[in-house]
Image (spheres, rainbow, N blue to C red):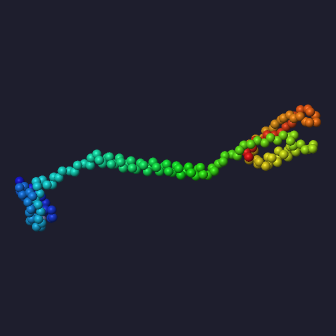
Amino acid sequence: MDVTFPCPSCQQDLAADSSLAGAEIACPTCNTKFFIPKAAPVAQPPPPPPAPAAPGSHLHAELHFSVPTTEAPTQSLIKKSNPTLGTPVKQGPALIQIKTIRRIECQEVGKDHFDERVTSFLQKIGEANIVSINTITYSYLPMESKVATDDYGVLIVFHG
Ligand SMILES: [Zn+2]
């Protein structure tokens, strides 16, 4: 039977008896010498599909990608936390303190300086730092009379 094959040089369709396969001939059209292929040379087996190796390597590539993506957020978190720790964001409200002013402490030779003392203290700490002002009453024992006497004062809560 004949086999048909193209000339490898000029693609001219040629035919020869299958018994001549492997023999060297010269193309009658272009005179190129070549070997007659064996029967059905065109039907080449399809290349085997790239089987399980391809998916495996694909997964491997994804794993490679996941490493830098997980590292990136960690690094950015560290970078963010540094300025937060370094900057004195808010020292919070100043320490809360109290100041007790008793009227008897403001007596000077018959003069009462209680209002002046309280006023000057409030001006010193500033109105914004005043939390509350509470009146207090207390008893004391004057040296002269030896009689318990009630008196008053203020307890100032403030930020200082
Ligand atoms: Zn040819």
Tell me which residue sits at (58%, 52%) in the image. Answer: 83
Tell me which residue sits at (36%, 50%) in the image. Answer: 61
Query: Looking at the rendering, which quadrant does residue 159 occupy?
Result: top right
Residue 85 coordinates in the image, percent (x, y):
59, 49
Foreground of the two, 97 or 3: 97
Residue 44 coordinates in the image, percent (x, y):
17, 52
Residue 6 coordinates in the image, percent (x, y):
13, 60
**Residue 35 makes an appearance in the image:** yes
Tell me which residue sits at (87%, 40%) in the image. Answer: 104
> Left or right: where does residue 41 sit relative to residue 131?
left
Identity of the residue furthest to the bottom in this view = 30
Foreground of the two, 22 or 86: 86
Identity of the residue furthest to the front in this view = 143
Number of numbered markers? 0
Compared with 75, 97 (above or below) is above
**Residue 29 makes an appearance in the image:** no
Query: Looking at the rendering, which quadrant does residue 146 occupy?
Result: top right
Tell me which residue sits at (40%, 50%) in the image. Answer: 65
Query: Looking at the rendering, which quadrant does residue 107 occupy?
Result: top right
Foreground of the two, 133 or 108: 108
Residue 71 coordinates in the image, percent (x, y):
46, 49
> Left or right: where does residue 68 sit relative to residue 101?
left
Identity of the residue furthest to the top in this view = 147
> Left or right: where does residue 130 sit relative to residue 37?
right
